[in-house]
């Protein structure tokens, strides 16, 4: 451990005098030196609040961690723009697509994606960010030497090599149920905003949102189908004042990141649609759709066409690969 660390932590108000004294006794017993040696063997490093690479955002939250253990690139957590992408561990197909789309596009524009490497939305967010060449960090509820859940081992390895794995828990700590609500305050604390893709009303995702609200974070929510249990939390957030988002550009605008690439992609999409030879009716129906599922009755009303014409046009667009039917009667643009 760095010389005088206990004293520096006490002077900055992170340790009581008694706690600093206990640490100094440990230093005299060489316990901490042996512990550091064990960490090094496991390729684990750590930072404390008095280190320059400790995440600045966490200094401003309640109960900031005294120690953060990590594997990977610690500089990621001090990137200029960060966003937590969180949601259900059992997302619908729509939820998985949306998590990937937002994470891929936002990470590609320089927004660092923070999540918890859980099954479902978290894992999709990390993978899409890595695939885009962007930066992403995972906050674990156990030691960073442990991959939890085991099914995300591939993501875990990629994060060590090209991202960041971080935790307030030492390598001896196994995944315990009570750890995850605690780690959620770190996910929100590291982020400038929080994007909720799919969530039940009672879930770990909503605990993270609560932490974010206490910390003054911006909450974004992707709307879902009425009556879908996985969308009850996101829809309630919108009713309570969260910012409704339907495409990555909504967040980029809020973060004031409008790149030339985004503008160019929009122009290319328009040129591609025109080159594909879509007729006037097909173009009209396409304008009634988005990446969010739209019910066929709403499409018919918006297009102001008769039922049979809209049904046949949807079939044509689906055959051409422009749209997908995500569930009976609900259509969205293909991502």
Image (cartoon, rainbow, N blue to C red):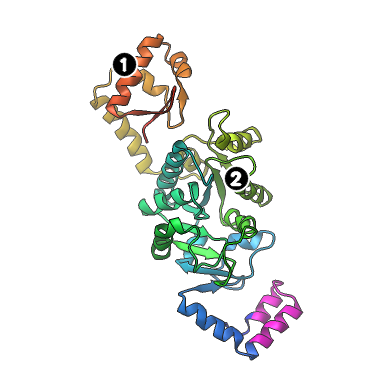
Provide the residue designation for mark 1.
280
Bounds of the magenta segment: 6-26
Horizontal and vertical percent for residue 170?
A: 57, 71
Q: Is residue 19 magenta?
A: yes
Provide the residue designation for mark 2.
218
Can the viewer see residue 111? no
Name the quadrant of the C terminus: top left
Q: Main secondary structure of the magenta part?
A: helix
User: Residue drawn 27% across and 30% down?
Assistant: 272
**Residue 206 position by quadrant:** top right
Furthest residue in direction top, as rendered: 306
| 147 lies left or right of 277 | right
| 133 lies left or right of 20 | left
Are the residues at dot 1 and dot 2 in contact (C-beta closer than 8 Å)?
no
Density class for disc 1 (Cα within 10 Å; few <14, some 14-19, many ≥20) is few
Name the quadrant of the N terminus: bottom right
């Amino acid at each position: 451990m760095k010389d005088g660390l206990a004293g520096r932590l006490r002077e900055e108000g992170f340790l009581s005098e008694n706690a600093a004294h206990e640490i100094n006794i440990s230093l005299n017993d060489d316990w901490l030196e042996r512990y550091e040696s064990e960490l090094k063997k496991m390729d684990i490093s750590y930072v404390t609040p008095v280190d320059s690479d400790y995440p600045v955002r966490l200094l401003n939250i309640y109960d900031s961690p005294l120690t953060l253990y990590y594997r990977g690139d610690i500089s990621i957590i001090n990137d200029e723009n960060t966003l937590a992408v969180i949601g259900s561990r059992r997302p619908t197909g729509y939820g998985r697509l949306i998590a990937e789309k937002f994470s891929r596009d936002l990470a590609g524009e320089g927004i660092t994606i923070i999540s918890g490497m859980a099954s479902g939305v978290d894992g999709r967010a990390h993978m899409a960010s890595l695939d885009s060449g962007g930066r992403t960090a995972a906050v674990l509820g156990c030691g960073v030497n442990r991959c939890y859940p085991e099914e995300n081992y591939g993501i875990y390895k990629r994060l060590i090599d090209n991202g960041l794995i971080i935790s307030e828990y030492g390598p001896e700590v196994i995944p315990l149920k009570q750890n995850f609500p605690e780690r959620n305050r770190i996910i929100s604390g590291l982020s400038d905003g929080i994007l909720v893709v799919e969530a039940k009303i009672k879930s770990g995702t909503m605990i993270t949102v609560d932490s974010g609200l206490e910390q003054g974070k911006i909450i974004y929510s992707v709307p879902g189908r009425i009556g879908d249990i996985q969308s009850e939390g996101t829809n309630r957030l919108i009713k309570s004042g969260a910012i409704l988002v339907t495409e990555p550009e909504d967040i980029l605008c809020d973060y004031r990141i409008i790149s030339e690439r985004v503008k160019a992609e929009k122009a290319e999409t328009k040129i591609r649609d025109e080159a594909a030879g879509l007729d006037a009716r097909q173009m009209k129906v396409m304008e009634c759709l988005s990446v969010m599922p739209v019910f066929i009755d709403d499409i018919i009303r918006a297009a102001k066409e008769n039922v049979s014409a809209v049904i046949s046009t949807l079939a044509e667009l689906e055959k051409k690969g422009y749209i997908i039917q995500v569930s009976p009667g609900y259509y969205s643009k293909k991502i």
